[in-house]
Image (cartoon, grey):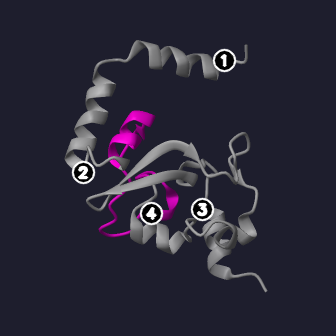
Amino acid sequence: MPDPLQAAHEALCRRCGRCCYEKYVVEERVFTTRTPCPHLDTRTRRCTVYDRRTEVNPRCVTVEEGIRLGVFPADCPYVQGVAGYVPSEEGWLDDDLVRWIEEGVLTRAEDVRREMERRRGRGDAAAAHRADRRRRPY
């Protein structure tokens, strides 16, 4: 028999896929990487093992766990109206920032946030060009 709570959650989901990217937690703040879960079809933005996702990937969380952990972005319908919800940080961790977190170079959430902002602010032209080329079909 279908779970009514799961059905209610499914009705809210916009299928953006942002919650299905790897995350790092620094000082209780959630930062999202550019690395999708291996079970996320990035074209359709749907989980290929959804019905058994928590069995196949123990790091996958239920909606309730995701709300508690703060993995959803601020505009996610799952968290609209949830009092006191603290969303994941805006923006993406690039590979260098992930490495610095893993190596213990960045250990404070404010430092991670500041470095993300610095990289956005400098207008990394090469990164913007690469991103633009990925969007084009040619």
Which residue is denoted by mark 3 in the rendering?
12
Residue type of the residue flagged with mark 1:
Arg
Which residue is denoted by mark 1 in the rendering?
136
Question: Badge 3: few (under 14), some or many (20 or more) residues near its Cα, within 10 Å?
Answer: few
Which callout, 4 or 1, points to the residue nearer the camera? 1
Which residue is denoted by mark 4 in the rendering?
79
Q: Which residues are magenta?
A: 73-101
Q: Is residue 20 above or below residue 125?
A: below
Q: Please name whichever residue, 135 or 54, is drawn nearer the observer in this view of the structure.
A: 54
Q: Secondary structure at mark 2?
A: loop
The residue under the point 73% across, 71% down is 52
Residue 112 lies in what quarter of the image?
Answer: top left
The residue under the point 71% across, 52% down is 46
Q: Is residue 95 above or below residue 46?
A: above
The residues bearing labels 3 and 1 have C-alpha atoms spaced at a distance of: 30 Å
Residue type of the residue flagged with mark 2:
Thr
Badge 2 or badge 1: first in the primary sequence: 2
Which residue is denoted by mark 2 in the rendering?
107
Where is residue 33? Give x, y as percent: 47, 44
The residues bearing labels 4 and 1 have C-alpha atoms spaced at a distance of: 32 Å
The residues bearing labels 2 and 1 have C-alpha atoms spaced at a distance of: 36 Å
